[in-house]
Structures are given as structure tokens and as C-alpha cells.
């Protein structure tokens, strides 16, 4: 991590105001109760570290999509009680993020309190990356700390402009995230396998084009595997029984050619699970590729031969990067392939044989469904930022904190 600034680089923080850019954009029900506290919980170690160093901690975050104007639905006041519970310390909420109200609250802070400011996105200037807004934001702060990797792909005012205005550093979560992803893709132990799922090839072109040049084995799964199957000569796959994209077949062939030129083995299904309906518990059967029914059945998952093949290849790998499920994991029993491969990856990880990194919304849900979320080396809280990292793009919120 010597490439990036960390809290240790900020020097003596005793009595200083540390502004912490967190990501508290957590899911909430219609009664404003937080339904998943993962992002809150993962911010706590950085807050505790800053407080232990004697800093006054002021937490800033976005929440929801208020589009530049305030509304109670998107107020961070709903998150304050959960942050207080996770910290075990009093959290004072301020219903603005800039101005005199904020400065007064900071002056009145007690040493055992944390300040949480109102939603940054109540100001349209935040998403525009406005420097004047950033100046107002960090005006009462002595140092700036970024712990919001999940927003690092956005050049928003609080992510980039603010970091240039004060002594700035990575928080613990940001450092952990960047470190894990670097080990997973930028500087991995080889052989390196990537598992990529998703419904459409067209949404993951940048990702696939980057991975075939970086990984040793690429498992293409989910609906987009159907297009690759068709491109590789599986004529039984069609628009009636799968998510094949006919206009992407030539693109799939080009990606496969690039993979071959870069000694990347593309791993496609050997057998599939087909069902009569797209619903949980639907009648289903496992068939080889040559026996996929032309109509009346839908491809829902991959079969036991494919699972065994992926797991066998995984046994020979040192690093795994995972984004996207193998089948329609939301509908049982079509989560079997995802569950079994995830369980095998977790077993190898726990045995110290594999470094496993996973990320993206569906991926986290799929691994939680498989009961192995705590058994991977690292699971990213980020969606878009994780994907852009895998695509090989530089993230503005990370780049700004290079030494």
C-alpha cells in the first residue's frame, strides 16, 4: 500500500477535525429501517482508529438518489441510530453538510461523540464535482479520509475535489479494498481464474476484453454464456430457450480469439439445467448441449459435469476473482451450480490454497445465499467501482490519493 497515502501519513491527529467520506448508502425498508448494516459495520474500524488518535470525527456520505434537493426519504438521519449502535458511541446528526450549522456542531463536539452530516447529494454540486462546494465541505476539517471505495469510480466533489484541498488519506476499508483487488487482478499469484456471470454480453464487453488479457482461465456463466455457446458452435441454443444475443455472436468470437492469443482458457458449460418455466421449483432436467430442447424449456443453470469441470480447474489455481452467479440463483433449485462452486472456492480459501476476491451486488447476494460469504479472502462492498476496477479503468477516487 506504499503507493497510496494512509492514516499513518497524516501525522499527529490529536484535537484535529477528521472528515471521513464513508459510504452509508444502505438498503432501507418503507418504514426507514436499515435492512443490511454491512456498509455501516465496515466503516466502524476507521472511525475508531481516528478517535483513538484523538481526532474529532465528522462523517459525510451520500444516500439514495435525491437529485440535488433535500427530502426526508433520503435523509441520513435514518442511518444515524444504526451508526450509533454499531459504534457504541453517541452520534450527533446535523441536518446540513456545509455552513455555520456544521461549524457550530463541530465546535461543540465532545471527545466521545461522532458527527454525521446530512446527505451530500442534497446539493447538486456534489455529483458535478464542484470545487466551490468541496471547499465549503472541507472548510471546518483539518484532514480528509476516504473510506468510500464503492463511490471511487465517480469524480464527485466529496471524492476527488475535497481530497485535493486538505491532507488526505485512505481509511482502513479503502486500503483493504484496494489491497485485495490489487492482489486479485493487478499482481496475482498464478494461475488466476475469473468467474464472470450476467445476463447479457453487451453489458460486460469492457470487462471481458480486459480479463482475457489478464487471467489464465475465464469461466463465462449466466445468460451471457448462451451467446458464447452459440458462437462456439452449440446450435441447440436459440432465442426461444435462452438469453442468446444474436447481434453479439461475432463479438463473442472476437473475444474468444483474443483469449486464445493471450493463452487464456475460456470455460463454457458442458451441460445445462433446463426448466419448463422461469420460476422457483419449476419442472427441470439436466441435458447435454446436443440435447437442449428447441422450445418449451429455458436454460436456468449449469449441470453437474460443468460444476465438476470448474471445480477441477479451480484446484489448480492460486487466485480467483468472481463477479456474477453461474445460474438463476434467486430461484431454487437453480442456485445449485453457484452454491457448489462457491463452496469449493471457500474450502480451498480456508485451506490456504486460494486467494479469493468477489464483488458486485448479485455476487454478494449469491455468496450469502450459498452460505460462504465469510469464507472468501475478500468480498467487496462495491458494485460499479468493483466492475470498473475489473475492467482495468483507473478510479478517480483512488487515483487522487496516490503519493
Image (spheres, rainbow, N blue to C red):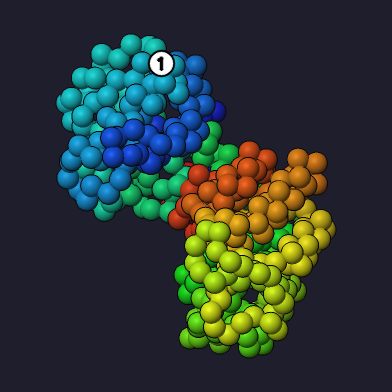
- Examine the image and state in which quarter residue 14 appears: top left
Q: Which residue is mark 1?
A: 89
Which residue is found at the position 43% from the left and 54% from the top? Answer: 153
Q: Report the residue that reaches farthest toward the front.
A: 283
- Image location of residue 181, percent across then percent down: 60, 50
**Looking at this view, is 13 or 224 the one in front?**
224
Relative to 213, is 167 above or below?
A: above
Direction from residue 44 to residue 311 in the image, left or right: right
Question: Can residue 269 be spotted in the picture?
Answer: no
**Which one is in front, 258 or 235?**
235
**Percent position of residue 194, x then y:** 66, 61
Residue plotted at (70% across, 54% down):
340
Judged left or right of residue 356, residue 241 is left
Q: Nearer the viewer, residue 256 or 214?
A: 256
Q: Name the residue rendered at 25%, 40% in the picture.
A: 74
Residue 260 is at least partly visible in this image: yes
Q: Residues within 10 Å of mark 1 (few under 14, many from 20)?
A: few
Residue 246 image position (x, y, % from top left): 50, 86
* Quarter the N terminus occupies: top right
> Disc 1 on helix, strand or loop?
loop
The residue under the point 56% across, 87% down is 250
Above-or-below relation of 11 to 381: above
Horizontal placement of 326 versus 193: left or right? Answer: left
For residue 270, above or below residue 112: below
234 vs 330, left or right, is right
Count numbered badges in the picture.
1
Which of the 4 image quarters holds residue 145?
top left
Position above or below: 98 against 236: above
Tell me residue 2's x, y (percent). 61, 40
Please tell me in which quadrant of the rendered image residue 165 appears: top left
Amino acid at each position: 500500500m506504499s503507493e497510496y497515502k494512509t492514516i499513518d501519513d497524516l501525522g499527529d491527529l490529536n484535537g484535529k477535525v477528521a472528515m471521513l467520506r464513508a459510504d452509508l448508502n444502505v438498503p432501507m425498508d418503507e418504514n426507514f429501517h436499515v435492512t443490511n448494516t454491512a456498509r455501516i459495520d465496515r466503516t466502524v474500524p476507521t472511525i475508531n482508529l481516528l478517535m483513538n488518535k484523538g481526532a474529532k470525527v465528522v462523517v459525510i456520505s451520500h444516500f439514495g438518489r435525491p437529485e440535488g434537493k433535500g427530502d426526508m426519504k433520503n435523509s441520513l438521519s435514518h442511518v444515524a441510530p444504526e451508526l450509533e449502535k454499531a459504534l457504541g458511541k453517541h452520534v450527533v446528526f446535523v441536518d446540513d453538510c456545509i455552513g455555520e450549522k456544521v461549524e457550530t456542531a463541530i465546535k461543540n463536539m465532545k471527545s466521545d461523540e461522532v458527527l454525521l452530516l446530512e446527505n451530500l447529494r442534497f446539493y447538486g454540486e456534489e455529483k458535478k464535482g464542484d470545487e466551490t462546494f468541496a471547499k465549503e465541505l472541507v472548510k471546518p476539517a483539518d484532514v480528509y479520509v476516504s473510506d468510500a471505495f464503492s463511490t471511487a469510480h465517480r469524480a464527485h466533489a466529496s471524492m476527488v475535489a475535497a481530497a485535493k484541498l486538505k491532507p488526505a488519506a485512505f481509511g482502513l476499508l479503502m486500503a483493504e479494498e484496494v489491497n485485495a483487488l490489487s492482489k486479485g487482478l493487478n499482481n496475482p499469484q498464478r494461475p488466476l481464474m475469473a468467474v464472470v456471470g450476467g445476463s447479457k454480453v453487451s453489458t460486460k464487453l469492457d470487462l471481458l476484453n480486459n480479463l482475457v488479457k489478464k487471467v489464465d482461465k475465464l469461466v463465462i456463466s449466466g445468460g451471457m454464456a448462451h451467446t458464447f455457446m452459440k458462437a462456439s458452435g452449440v446450435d441447440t441454443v436459440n432465442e426461444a430457450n435462452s438469453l442468446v444475443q444474436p447481434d453479439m455472436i461475432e463479438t463473442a468470437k472476437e473475444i474468444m480469439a483474443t483469449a486464445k492469443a493471450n493463452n487464456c482458457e475460456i470455460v463454457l458449460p458442458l451441460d445445462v439445467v433446463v426448466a419448463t418455466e422461469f420460476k422457483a421449483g419449476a419442472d427441470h432436467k439436466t441435458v447435454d448441449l446436443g440435447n437442449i430442447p428447441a422450445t418449451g424449456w429455458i436454460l436456468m443453470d449449469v449441470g453437474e459435469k460443468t460444476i465438476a469441470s470448474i471445480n477441477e480447474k479451480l484446484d489448480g489455481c492460486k487466485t480467483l476473482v468472481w463477479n456474477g452467479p453461474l445460474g438463476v440463483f434467486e430461484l431454487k433449485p437453480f442456485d445449485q451450480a453457484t452454491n457448489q462452486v462457491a463452496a469449493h472456492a471457500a474450502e480451498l480459501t480456508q485451506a490456504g490454497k486460494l486467494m479469493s476476491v468477489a464483488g458486485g451486488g448479485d455476487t454478494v447476494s449469491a455468496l450469502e445465499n450459498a452460505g460462504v460469504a465469510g469464507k472468501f479472502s475478500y468480498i467487496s462492498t462495491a458494485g460499479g467501482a468493483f466492475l470498473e476496477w475489473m475492467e482495468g479503468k483507473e478510479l478517480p477516487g483512488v487515483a487522487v490519493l496516490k503519493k
